[in-house]
Image (tube, rainbow, N blue to C red):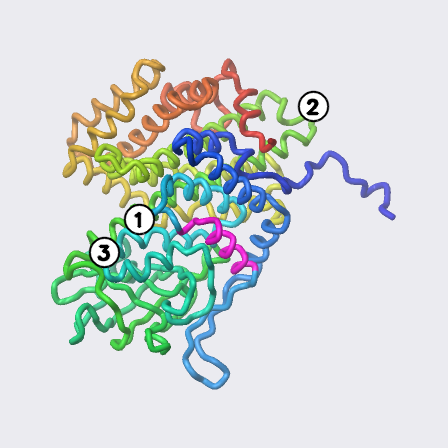
Amino acid sequence: MEARSHTVTNQAPPLVGYDVFTCDRALSEAVARHLPAELLDGVREELRGLGRAAGSEQVREWGELANAFPPRLRTHDRYGRRIDEVDFHPSWHRLLGKAVAAGLTDAWGRPGGHVRRAAGFLVATQAEAGHGCPVSMTHAAVPALRAEPELAAVWEPLAASRVYERGLRPAAGKAGVLLGMGLTEKQGGSDLRAVATSARPLGEDGAYLLTGHKWFCSAPMSDAFLVLARAPGGPTCFLVPRVLDDGSRNAFALQRLKDKLGNRSNASAEVEFDGTTWARRVGEEGRGLRTVMGMVAATRLDCVLGSAALMRQAVAQAVHHASYRAAFGGLLADKPLMRNVLADLAVESEAATVLGMRLAAAYDSGTERDLALLRIAVPAAKYWVTKRCVPVVAEALECLGGNGYVEESGLPRLLRESPLNSVWEGAGNVQALDVLRALRTEPAALDAYLREVGEARGADPRLDRAIRGLLAELADLDGVEARARRLAERLALVLQGALLVRWAPPEVADAFCAGRLGGEAGSAFGTLPHTLDLRAVVERARPVE
């Protein structure tokens, strides 16, 4: 019997047992907007099933366990033989099985594949973010593999499989595979041209032996990896399988696992190639940077989607808490100042979701204009959305007060995860410089961007002023490298504003334009003009069906 002094009152119930997809209005509306009508019913049903799973108590527990019991490196077996394996908690494998079965590695070969996959990735990441890494890399490897059609014919169907089959065996004997990548080196970081890993050609066509070291290799228990190495003709992309066709282990030594701030369910390793590591060339010698860039662009979009997912989950938790928690004579969500904070967070979350889904739809359309748009919009979105993730999650945690600072709330795990996507696949400066590169070398990219934001001109004077200001900044490229971050930020904000003005409810677009484009808000969240319809913005973000 519980003592009277320990009776629990005024606490929000756990946010479990709900449909993560259906309760996210911005996401479900984006799916309806970007998919052909004939696909919509079937895709909605798929995403509702994934949404119910992601919001279930069981899957949430899998995420907690996968992080509470992180992967463990085993370099040798009990007899002293080198095995280079990583042991994961069973919950990790269950999460991966759900993600693969939901088609999150299958986008490139089906109608509306990128939109439906992006939506699923947003949903699954809200249950647990770490397992999204091998899912993302497997999906993103496909464009690189297609540079070598013979390889793609073998590996692409396995990568797109709906079957997750754990364990290291020859790919030909598996129903599905996961693919990773190894690009980063100690001496180079994001400077891929500085690659020092060497590749020596063998007699057989396309086969090489690698010597070198990779500083970051994520998900090292994947079946194969796309690796950059310096061949006689220059930096070249290679496929490095963990197990060779004859069943023997490839020379792929795991030196150690990284002890990371967050993303703890996922293993990241340092990898050594000892001169006998067998690899198959992907694409032409010396064209490795071009080959891997298709993969990098796809993973950068997943960084945007992953950050949007973390923001959405943090905002859902904050709004849910404030809708039940009472203070000073009423519910927190009804207090004007808390309502302002929640609305500001909700607007940021919706802007990230709408932008990420528009970019996924650009992949599906495949038009010349949309592909050009991706060249400038992906690095700008990656720069800005991933940077907004940390303050959004931190502010959402504060909405729960001390409860949010406690591990059981789940917010600390989200906060530890929140900086990752800004670092992964090129940190902020790399993205900003990539925006400049697109502006300088690809006039079609800027033209596609301006046509995209031009669709919303005349609908909101604050957006129109922001577009004019952006054009003035683009006209003056003096000292532009030092201004690259500011330019990337403005490109992302104007694009988000244009998309919200076109597609979001008026109260959401109004709040975004006031706070992000019109200079009517302060630097902290919760400083939107009080005259806006903030109640409607908060209610829209509430995770209820």
Q: Position of residue 301 (x, y in %)?
A: 35, 43
Residue with the most extreme front position: 38
Q: Does the magenta stretch include residue 444?
A: no
Q: Is residue 279 left or right of residue 44?
A: left
The part of the image, by quadrant, that contains residue 467 is top left
Q: Mark 1 = which residue? A: 426
Residue that appears at 26% across and 32% down: 487
Tell me how many marks there are.
3
Instruction: Give amino acid for label 1.
Output: Gly
Which residue was labeled with disc 3? 192
Mark 1 and mark 2: span between their CA atoms?
Answer: 46 Å
Mark 2 → mark 3, Cα distance in angstroms: 56 Å
Between 522 and 208, the one nearer to me in the picture: 208
Query: Which class describes the residues within 10 Å of circle 1: few (<14), some (14-19), or many (20+)?
Result: many
Instruction: Determine whether the residue tagged by mark 1 lies in a helix, strand or loop.
Output: loop
Give the extent of the magenta segment: 91-105
Q: 201 or 399: which is nearer to us?
A: 201
Which residue lies under the disc numbered 2?
Answer: 330
- Mark 1 or mark 2: which comes first in sequence? 2
Magenta segment, principal secondary structure?
helix
